[in-house]
Image (spheres, rainbow, N blue to C red):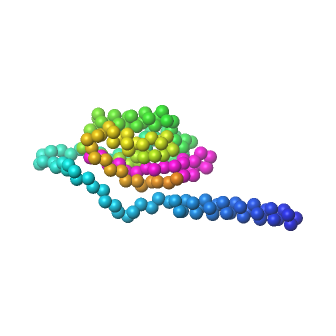
Amino acid sequence: MKTFLKISLFTISIIVLLFVLFLAFFTITDYKPDATFDIHNTDHPDTLKRGDTLTIITWNIGYAGLGNKMDFFYDGGEQVRTTNENTQKNLAEINNFLSNTCKPDFMLLQEVDKKAKRTYFIDETKHLAGLFKEFFMFFAPNYKVRLVPLPATSPMGFVHSGLLSLS
């Protein structure tokens, strides 16, 4: 009986220790951006003249992963991420809309992945900046975690995502 009790206490202690280490890891590695930071590039500022128009778009692109073929688990669905093929297709459609249909002077895009398992580690910031070479690009991370542990059966994994402005 004493042996069973010792083994049980040891097992419970190991489980508690692993849980505490799990919480400590995520607390220590939690992304904490500075409250403010300077972003500026004034090499060639453009100015508008009276009568000129300025076209602006703000769009949550859903990291090019939340298209009509996605059954996202946070919305009660089954999938953690769409296929690589669908991600590429969604990104191409976003590019087409911005380049050919909308043609904005200023873009503020939300949920743009710089590096994430959910988008097959495609650097969407680099991809979009490559399409709009004449634009200044600024990226501000707002979601940077080593591991999104949900859902438990298939964790979302590493995510480095944020806001992208192109002007």
Q: Is residue 104 visible?
A: no
Along the line of sight, which residue is nearer the eye, 40 or 163?
A: 40
Q: Is residue 98 magenta?
A: no
User: Quick one: which residue is furthest to the front in this view?
Assistant: 43
Along the line of sight, which residue is nearer the eye, 82 or 16?
A: 16
Residue 36 location, quadrant: bottom left
Q: Position of residue 82 (x, y in %)?
A: 50, 38
x 45%, y 61%: residue: 32
Q: Position of residue 151 (x, y in %)?
A: 58, 49
Left or right side of 57 for 2: right
Residue 34 location, quadrant: bottom left
Q: Is residue 89 visible?
A: yes
User: Quick one: which residue is furthest to the bottom in this view?
Assistant: 2
Q: Position of residue 63 (x, y in %)?
A: 43, 44
Q: Is residue 18 above or below residue 116?
A: below
Left or right side of 22 for 81: left
Residue 102 location, quadrant: top left
x 29%, y 40%: residue: 133
Q: Is residue 104 above or below residue 100?
A: below
Left or right side of 50 for 60: right
